[in-house]
Each structure stands twice: as C-alpha cells, then as structure tokens.
Amino acid sequence: MSTTQDNLLEATGITKRFGGLTAVSEISFSIPRKAIVSLIGPNGAGKTTFFNILTGLYKPTEGRVSFDGTNITGGRPDKIMALGVARTFQNIRLFGTMSAVENVMVGAHSRMKAGLLGSILRPPRVGREEREVRAKAVETLSYVGLRPALHDQLATNLAYGDQRRVEIARALVSEPKLLLLDEPTAGMNAQESADLTRFMQRLRDDVGLSILLIEHDMKVVMGVSEHVTVLDHGEGIAAGAPSEVRNDPLVVEAYLGKQESERQRQESGEG
Amino acid sequence: MRAASTAGPSFRDRFELSHRVRVGITAAALIAGGLLPLFVDGGGGFIDDATVALAYVMMALGLNIIVGFAGLLDLGYVAFFAIGAYTMGYFGSLFHITANGGEGVHILVAGPAAQLPGLHFNFFIIIVLAIAATTIAGMLIGLPTLRLRGDYIAIVTLAFGEIVGRIAINGDEIKFLDTRLTAGRQGITPVDKIDLPFLETFNSLELRPWYWTAFVLVLIAVFVNFRLRDSRLGRAWIALREDEVAAVSMGVPQVKTKLLAYGTGAAFGGVSGAFLGSYLNTVNADQFQFSFSIFVLAMVILGGLGSIWGVVVGAIALSFINNRLIPDVLNDVPGKIGLDFDLTELSFGIFGFLLVIMMVLRPEGLIPERRRKIELKAGIEGLVVDEDTEKQP
Amino acid sequence: MAAAGLPASTSGAVSSVRRFLAQNGLIGVLLIMPLAFAFHDLRTEGDLSRLGNNLVDGLSNGSIWALVAIGYTLVYGIVELINFAHGEVFMLGSFVSVSFFSTIGLTVATGIPGLVAGLLLTLLVTMFALGTLNTMIERVAYRPLRNAPKLAPLITAVGFSFILLNVGLLWRGGSQRSIPNLIDSQALLVSIAGVNITRGDLLAIAVTIPLVLGMTIFISRSRLGKAMRATAQDPDAARLMGINVDTTISATFMIGGLLAGAAGLIYALYQTTIWFFQGFTAGLIAFTAAVMGGIGNIRGAVLGGLIIGFIQQLSDNRIGSQWTPAVVFAYLVLIMVFKPSGLLGEQTREAG
C-alpha cells in the first residue's frame, strides 16, 4: 500500500453494518493527490454508504479513514468538511428556499468567522467577510457556468442541470482538497455529461483538486478516471485502471447478473 | 390544499408591491408607531393594550428565530416568559424581603424602591440577568432535542414548558434558605417600576414611557432579527431547517447552531418577560400556561413563519384580538392582565378556529417570507445524522 | 497514528457503556420511583400494601390512558401527525356519555340489569359519536393538508384542540362537575393482602381488555386492518396496490375516536368528576404513554399507558397531585433522552 504522503485519502478496512445488514465490508481504498478516481457498482452496492462514511454522516463499524494525514474516522461531518472534503448528493439536496448565491454561501460556512454577536453588531470585519464571501460565491457560480441572471433565483426554481451546477459550486466554494461527486451526470444528456467530464478534468488540472466519483455512466467513468474501484454487495470486487476493470469477469457479472454473464460465456464458448 | 395553492399566489400577486413602496409603508408605520402615544390618552386602555402588544411582538420575534428561521417547533416558549418575569420578580420586588437582614439590597435604583426591603436592581441589570437566564434555559431545553426531529422536538419543548409552569404554580411550597421559590398563584406583587437614568421612575398612571420603552425594545428586536437572518448564522439556521444532512455536510455544526437558535430566541422571551413583570406589576403563575405558548406560536404562524414584518403584524393583530376585540365583543372581563384565557371566554375557540382557517387557506401567513413561498419542508427522510451513538439494531 | 485530528471514535469501554445505557437506561429510569417507594414502605410500614394499592389504582387509570394512547399511536403510525386534538376528543367522550346516560334516565337508584344495559348502550353511543367526530376532524382539518408541510396539520390539530376545549367549556362551564356515581366506583370488591380492588378497577379492566383485544384482532385479521398496516408502512406503495388511502386513514381516526370515547366513559364513571380541561393533561399523558411504548406500536401504547398510570398514581399519592403533570413530563423528557424509540419501538425516521 502506498504511503500517506502520496495519498490524500486513505481508507482501511472499512466495514459498516446496519443491524444484521452489512452495507459495506472490508473496503480499503485510497485517493492520490490531484487525481480522479471512481467508485462504481450496481445499485445498492454500498457506494453511497461508503461516501457517507468518508464524509462523517455514518460512523464505520470497523476501519479507519485518514485524510491528508489526519485521522477522520467517525468525525463530525462539519469538521471533516472544514478539513477540506466537500461533496454533492445523488438526489440534489439544495436548500430550496435560499437563492443560488445563498446556497453557495452556506458552503463557505466553515471558512467564515462571524459569531452570534458579530452577526448582530456586524463590525467592519464581519461586513467585509460577508461581501468577500458573496463575491466569491458569485464567482464560483460563474465558474460552474450558472448564468448571472439565475444567481438570485431560489434554488427550487432552477432547472435540473442548473441545480447540479449550484450544488457543485456550493461544494467548491470552501476550496476543498477533495471533492466527492455522487452520480453527477444522473439525468444529463450526452452533451452535458461530456461538458461535466471536461469540467472535472479542469478542476484537477487547474485547481489541483482530487475527485472521487460515483457514476453509472461508463463513458464518463472510463474517460476521466485514473483508477476505478468496483463494489458489489458491499464488497470490493475489483480495482485498477479503467481498462483492467472493464474486462474483469466479476465486474461483468455484477453488472449483468450471474445467469446473464454465464449465458454470454457459454455463447462465446459455443460460438 | 386546492384552496391553498390557488388562493395563495393569486392573492399575493395582487398585493405584490414594489420595493420602494414597501420601504415607504414600513417607514410610515414605524413613525406612526413611535408618535402614536402623542395622540391618545396616556392613561387609557388603548395605550395599555398597545404596550402589551409590543411586549408580545418581542416574544413572537424571539420564537420566530427558533421556529421560523431554524425550523425547531417549540411549544414551550412560555417557559422563557416565565423565567424573564421571575428574574424581574426576584431582583426587583419585596419578594426576598429578609435579604440583607431586612435592609434590602439596592443596586443603582432611585425612587421609592431605594427605601424598600428586598432586592432592587436597576432595570438594565435585570434585563442582562434575564437574558443570561433565558439563554441558558433555552440551551438546556434544546439539549435533549438535538437528536430528535419535528414533532418530537415539539413534545419535549412542550413538556419543559409545562414543567416550568408547574414549578411556577407550586413553587410556593418549595423553600430554600428562607424564601419560597415562587409566589405561586398569588403572584409576586408589587414589582418595581422601570427606572431609567435621567427620567422619572415610571408609574401606572402615565403609560407613555412604558410604551416608548417597549417600542425601542421591539425596534432592537427587529434589528437583531434582520441582522441575524442575513448573516452566516442565519443562513446556517435556514440551511439546517431545509435539509439537515446537506447542511452538516456543508460544514454547519448541528449542535452549536441549533443551541444558538434556542438560546437567542429564548433571550427575547426573557427581556419581554422582565418588561411585562414590571409593567403588569405582578409575576403570577397563572400567566405561564401552555395556551400562552400556543398564543405566541399563533402570532408567528399568522404573520408568516420566518417573515420578520409578518410576525410583527401577526403579533399585533392577535394581541388586539385577544385584549380588545374579544373582551369588547363579548362584553366580558376587561383585558388588563395580558392574556385572558380566563376560562369564561370564547378566546380558546376563536384562536383554534383562526389557526385552522389560517393553515388550511393560507399556510404561508399574512406576509409570507420570500423563502416561505416554497414552504416548510417536512423532516428529512432517509439519512439520519447521529452525533454520538451507534445505530442501534 | 495520525497527528492530533478529530476526536476519534470513542473507546470500546465508553461505547459499550453507552450502548448499555441506550438499551436499559429507560427501564432503569422507570424503576426509580417504584423502587424508592418500595424501600420506603418496607422501612416505615413493613409491607408493600400501599405500593400494591398504588399499582392497582395505577393500572385502572393506566388502562384509560392506554385506550387514549392507542388513538395517538395509530394516527401517528399512519399519517405521522401528533393529533393534539385527541385529548379533547377523550374529554368530549366523558361529556357525551354523561349527557347520554342522564338523558336515558340512569341514576344511582337504577337496578343492576338496567344499569348494565344502559351503560352498554351509553358505551356504544359514545364510541360511535366520538368515532364520527374524530373522522370529521380528520376530514376538515387534516385531509386538506395531506401534502402540505409537516407543521401545517400539527397547527390545525392544536387549533381543533382549542375549538373542542371551547365546546366543552360552553357545554358544562369552567369548573369541575361531579356526576352521579352510578357504579359506586370506590366500593370494595375484594381485598388481597391489604390491596383493595374496587368496582371502578373492575370496570376499567373489564372494558379495556375486550376493546384492546378486539381491536388488535381487527387490525391483524381484517382487510381494513391490513390496509391500515400497509398504509402506515408506505402510503404510496399502498395506493399503488389499490388500497384507498383516504378511507384507510378515515378508518384509523374512527378507531382512535371509538377508543377515546370508551376511555371517556370509563373515566367519568371511575373519577365521578368531569371538566372541560381534563383532556389537556390526559392527552399529554396518553401521548407520553404512546411515546414511551414506542410510537406506532399498539402493544407499546398499552404498556406505556399502564406504566404511566402507575407513575401518575405514585405521584398523586406520594408527592402530591399538583406535581403530577411535572413528574409525567419529566419522565417524557427522560424517555426522549434515553430511548426516543420507546420500550417496544423500532428506530423510526423521526427519532434517530
């Protein structure tokens, strides 16, 4: 296993049980710096559970997660966020009654200092902080490609693709070191997916971000990731470069189902 | 449902006003509010009701922080009214009559109170004490609710409100040192009148100074509400209200942020309670009943959850309905002591009816918050953030 | 090991203590009062007959709370609403039953056969009346808000509770009313080792047990009962399966009203005083019982009702009835702290 210095995130032996159900079992996983890695697998394979463990929403039953040299196992989500792990959600979870800009400003919460009294009295430093964060939120929204006219729209009134943009901006505004994207291309057409793929590469190359991607769209996964881990029934069944994983029989089986893959094998054997 | 979705927007569209007009109306209303006492009898019933109404506005603005901003349904807000009022009673009356060997303790007070036995502190000191006491109480009451959601928060806060109410009623049985904990249903009376620097001590014949004091307190409360709403903290509250999981994932600390909402909201109740204790000249256990919590909540909902001006309007409307309209219409007992839930009226039923009608026809309130056009979201399903316990099987 | 980072997960010992507390803390809390008074009685009186009497009275009271608590738990289970008006429905149950048996001329002088027949009739009429009322409340105040934000129906529930309170106030005035003690409820039936069982106790048990059994069977066997359980689990799926969700919800409120009506009659006969405010405290006590048992769980509601009845009786008898609400609510807070899911409850969506 590679050393902590090389890897931004290191997860070892992660297991999560809910009552009798084992959602994630003995997953070890690492994310190098400035890299895009993917987590794939059929629905219910435990990908999102794993995400939730990394971000502190769940505590792992066993195992250890360290981020940037710090042990974050079972830490509070807001503290993990403050250390530089930001995420988006599979079903977009924006704050519906806040504007796009305000949503993004919430993402900067951990980077701001104003407390209760500061918020009420608003001394110059707090006023400056507000203005700076607002400006940065606007800038980030423009960076992810939200039209300025939409910046003050309530989040629920935005179109689906724009909501995705706002969610990514909300994650980016805190200047994280690691960005976790949970099925970001869900509901997007091919063109939009391609745009997003390029966008992720730009984040990695220009900003130096690491990205962990959960994705179903194999075109996106294969195109962008340096490393792919495949989960099925909570267990890691394959890991490696996209080209290796693609042809792994276990992976094919997990995706197509056992009978189907056997049939394919037989057919190819007979034919 | 059908009625709400069709009547709501059309009604609002018709009354959607431009920004400038709204600022104008607000400014005019504030000036009118400030000058009002000059045009009415300074010892009359109207200014009396108006002063009480302003005290209620303050409480409604406090509850608005807890329920409107942070989305924590608090059904025990009366506890903070009680704690604020008892702070006034403890430190500004004859209640601790044996204090200092019967000589009394006087801190920065002039006027008649300076000669009396018991504790007599300056009103400003009492306000600070009331803020401190209610903030702490708010956080303590908030603590057990942190792991809970929605209805469960309502029930726990209700339980706390009732416990405080019970202690107020039965506190005359509890003695430590040689004073009782409360004066029960008899009430602590008389209570010191407000005594501000450079002004004569207030009295019960000339009510204008009381009104202006309450008016200034309300202005401060409105100011604080606006400042908080448009701040890092306010956004964090609204984020938690909208989606707790998303909020904590974006770096909002759940425990601290919620406790700040409880504590801040409670402090308004404390200030208002201390003011009312002095103004009504009694701190009486019968004031602190569950129905009062609902009364304040009704103001917030009637005005529009989270909407600051809406809450102000809602509070004024309901306190006038309660103190003037209902007593006059029913030709019933005069409404001197704030709430006349005095078991011989229809006010229960009228309030109940208002709540039902309001919620069915216009769930977003009289002056809905811009944000409230989308309305409160139900509890977050699925993910559950568990701060400190393992998931139990 | 990494440098000082976030507080890592708690050590094994601490977390196992926590788990122990989470599982058994509630039971421990519940035992505090009975155990303390048992020691006290043994020291001062040498036997436990006083505690035994508290227990019997507590169970009788508790069976009333159990009936009301089932109404809360059923409604919560199916629509996730705390039906604040339910306590007032119970109060009106007392009022309707008293008015009815007075109207048909039942008095203390009525002979046993007439009394039994008359009370059975009263029971049926009261149950039917309150079941209908509860269904109507659902129709007017909750159904229009089925898809509204969660806070909305809670507020209309509070509103209806006030309206019903006012109805009660106008109906019988603002003070406690004594009513004819038809069954001579304090009359001793049998005394075992100093523990007295009265006619009132018998009545409470004799009405409650068949009702609870009947209802449990209804819910587990009947079509409508199955529809109720399906709707409680997943309303959308139930709708897809062809279940009429509106009817099912109406039926749930109907059952809740029936049982609250029965509880109202028992309460009136047992306590022999009624007043319009009885439903407020009763509602909160019964809700506490439902939460204690695990909301959504009928057996839990019955168990919770009996336990709360006992606690309440202990508090009435030993601490003073003026403190009883505070004691019950303190228990409620403790339950929320130790085990929000209740004694028999599953982890719910609400209580993490």
Image (tube, rainbow, N blue to C red):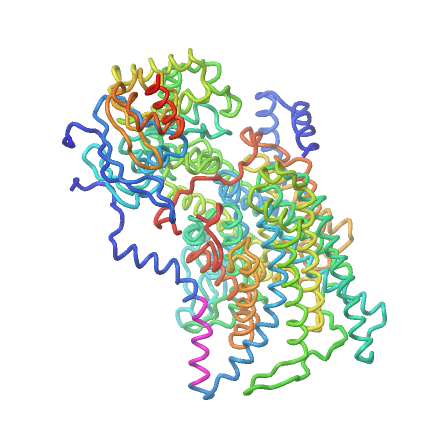
| Residues drawn in magenta | C30-42
Left or right of C118? Residue A206 is left
Residue B243 in percent (x, y) is at: 46, 36
Q: Does the magenta stretch include residue B176?
A: no
Residue C110 in percent (x, y) is at: 82, 78
Residue A13 in percent (x, y) is at: 24, 40
Using the rendered image of the protein, determine whether residue C243 is visible from the camera's viewpoint. Answer: yes
Quadrant of image for the N terminus of chain B: top right
Left or right of B32? Residue C275 is right
Q: Which of B188 and A101 is in front in this view?
A: A101
Q: Quadrant of residue B264?
A: top left
Residue positioned 59% across, 61% down in the render = C286
Q: In which quarter of the image is residue A225?
A: top left
Q: Does the magenta stretch include residue C32?
A: yes
Residue positioned 38% across, 58% down in the render = C22
Residue C184 in percent (x, y) is at: 72, 80
Is A95 located above or below residue C133 in the figure? above
Q: Nearer the viewer, residue B270 or C133?
A: C133
Q: Main secondary structure of the magenta part?
A: helix
